[in-house]
Amino acid sequence: MDRARDSILPVSAILAGVVAVWYVGAVLFNAPFQRDLDRRAGESPGIAEFVGRTLSQPKPTLPAPHQVASNFFENTFLRPVTSNRSLVYHSWVTLASTLLGFAFGTALGVAIAVGIVHLTTLDRSLMPWIIASQTIPILAIAPMVIVVFASIGITGIIPKALISTYLSFFPVAVGMVKGLRSPELTHLDLMHTYNASRPQTFWKLRVPASVPFLFASMKVAIAASLVGAIVGELPTGAVAGIGAKLLSGSYYSQTIDMWAALVAGSVVAALLVTLVGAAGRLVERSMGARPA
Amino acid sequence: MKIKETSVVSASGLGLTFETGDGPVRALSDVDLTIGKGEFVSFIGPSGCGKTTFLRVIADLEKPTEGTILVNGMTPEQARERRAYGYVFQAAALFPWRTIDRNVALPLEIMGVGRDEQQARIRRTMDLVNLTSFGNKYPWQLSGGMQQRASIARALAFDADLLLMDEPFGALDEIVRDHLNEQLLELWARTEKTICFVTHSIPEAVYLSTRIIVMSPRPGRVSDVIHSTLPSERPLDIRETPEFLAIAARVRDGLRAGHSYED
């Protein structure tokens, strides 16, 4: 009951508000074109009829929520997953490169963090470059990465995954630097009194202390990976994936398809973030964290 | 200066000056002190008197800037490398991701003690601090007093002869503190370790120690050394005896004398 009052109710209220605004927006955005159509057809529908028509255009400027919902449902559940029109298929293509890029990015981020924490030279020299790397617009980098790799014969999932890596290593590196430096002074002093070696202090103190930071930054990183994968599909003429779906939708003004693909992307993102969060809770529980 | 064979800690002319942003701060000045094997020595004084700093110098957590100090006849660094002492901090400083047993095992793992030997030592030290049945709990499941006992078990686990305790019971309430003081004396009698104990409680210092070092601040120095005449058998109500109160009064006088130049 508390749960219903505390989380479901407020979330549903906001959702209802968004849907209402969306419907109003759909009517307003689609009205000019609908008026055009009606004038050319020589028709003059009543207000209810007119509103109904603005919400059921095949290629609306702003599709109505129910159009997106039915398109999403149809292309997710009613098509074989191998079909080129199935959103499950496209989501899977994007998901595969998201996960690969996320794995690369996490590994790279952790490696950079370990280097920065242990070598003052790296701390001074690398950090500014890492921060600078994130100020470069990914949309500018993505086509170059794809083209450069294609020129040396590497195409497909790897270049796409590298764009995800580029976006996802950053939060992991920053989070892990913080995490590896999180042990209290007393804990470090304690290890010093035992005459512990640096590897011992690293494995027995710094690594376990950094676990909560790792999962917090992995949540951000996996969402960034997904963005990277979608962006990687846009300029490459990819034939499959959520990015390709968005692009072809915009070529052919299939706005409903585009919105459905966006919804698919959001669902994938929500699932991924939830999964990482759940994995984090599981690991922390097994490390004796007080249950929340 | 010839160091006696039995001295565990011997300092002469010891001084430590911290370089801070506001200029140098003299934390310790001209400390001469010898601590013999099996002694229970308390360091008492107001904050800033250098008592913790002195303990940290023994532990090689701070480097002195003047004078010399030997621990077991070695430099503090050599002594630390040979794991000559166990250190108990003011906070229990247990690793939250390890059970109590694994926390006690931490120094043993680092020192490369074998699995079976680890188990035996964990059992022995957990018995010593009366935590036998709590080995599988995580720190947050224990009270503050129990956590501090676990941290004492951890300091005892590798059988160092010297125990350095920095206000270990400072954050605990008085009832728990009394209880732990009693247990600590018992443990000291049983293990015959040398204990250096930092506190700012006069009754605690008098109750526990064979010798009380009164320190005064700015710069941190020894202002009085009081040998306790109390018997080694000390029930808690010894604190009401005239003998106890006389020693406490002397400690208080020493503290006051050290303070007087300030006001």
Image (cartoon, coloured by chain):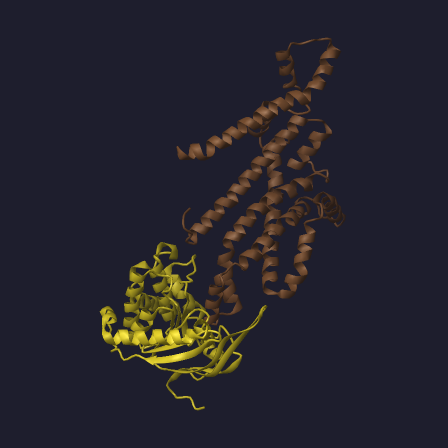
Residue depicted at 51% across the width and 70% down the height? A197
Which residue is more in the foreground, B56 or A151? B56
**Picture colour for chain A:** brown
Quadrant of the rendered structure where residue B20 is?
bottom right
Position in image of residue B244 (x %, y %): 26, 74
Which residue is more in the foreground, B53 or B219? B219
Of all residues, the one furthest to the right in this rendering is A151
Of all residues, the one furthest to the front in this rendering is B263
Residue depicted at 62% across the width and 35% down the height? A90
Position in image of residue A14 (x %, y %): 53, 30
Q: Is residue B213 left or right of residue A50?
A: left
- Compared to residue A144, the image places residue B225 above or below, namely below
Report whether residue B104 is seen: yes
Quadrant of the rendered structure where residue B252 is?
bottom left
Q: Is residue B189 left or right of residue B222?
A: left
**Which image quadrant: the N terminus of chain A?**
top left
Residue depicted at 41% across the width and 48% down the height? A291
- Compared to residue A94, the image places residue A41 above or below, namely above
Position in image of residue A97 (x %, y %): 62, 44
Judging by colour alone, the chain drawn in yellow in this rendered image is B
Q: Is residue A249 left or right of residue B95?
A: right
Which residue is more in the foreground, A140 or A49? A49
Report whether residue B162 is seen: no
Position in image of residue B164 (x %, y %): 40, 73
